[in-house]
Image: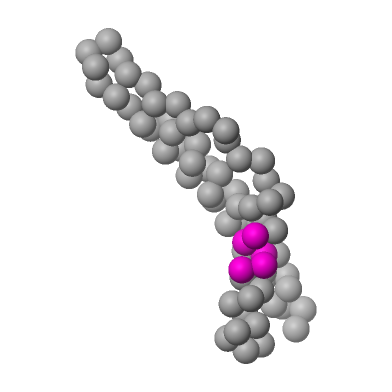
Amino acid sequence: MTDQEIEQLVQNKLNEAYKANEHPKKFFITANGRGVTDGGDMYNALLNDVMRVMQQAMTDILKEALKK
């Protein structure tokens, strides 16, 4: 595969994986009684979403690349 074919394959598979997953509609930021804001839940939800998309895309990319 040429560099351009690999680049196009990666782009296509990332787009497919993104469209195939349902993404969180809301991310929650919590504040405790002392006014301290915690974005940990938001960060974890976003990280899990991105990792799920990347895992699916990379699996498809490797399957496609190993066929050739």
State which quadrant residue 49 falls in. Answer: top right
Quarter placement of the N terminus: bottom right
* Segment tinted magenta in the rendering: 11-15
Is residue 22 on the magenta stretch? no
* Residue 59 against residue 35 in the figure, above or below: below
Q: Residue furthest top?
A: 33
Q: Residue furthest bottom?
A: 2
* Residue 50 against residue 36 in the figure, above or below: below
User: In front: 62, or 37?
Assistant: 37
Residue 54 located left or right of residue 39 = right
Q: Residue at x 43, y 30 (%)?
A: 41
Q: Residue at x 48, y 44 (%)?
A: 47
Residue 39 located left or right of residue 33 = right
Q: Position of residue 17 (x, y in %)?
A: 67, 55
Q: How is the image coloured?
A: one colour
State which quadrant residue 64 falls in. Answer: bottom right
Residue 42 located left or right of residue 38 = right
Magenta part mainly helix, strand or loop? helix
Q: Position of residue 68 (x, y in %)?
A: 75, 83
Q: Residue at x 59, y 77 (%)?
A: 7
* Residue 27 against residue 58 in the figure, above or below: above
Residue 56 located left or right of residue 27 = right
Q: Residue furthest right?
A: 67
Is residue 14 on the magenta stretch? yes
* Residue 59 against residue 46 in the figure, above or below: below
User: In front: 27, or 60?
Assistant: 27
Residue 57 seen anywhere in this rendered image of the structure? no
Residue 18 seen anywhere in this rendered image of the structure? yes
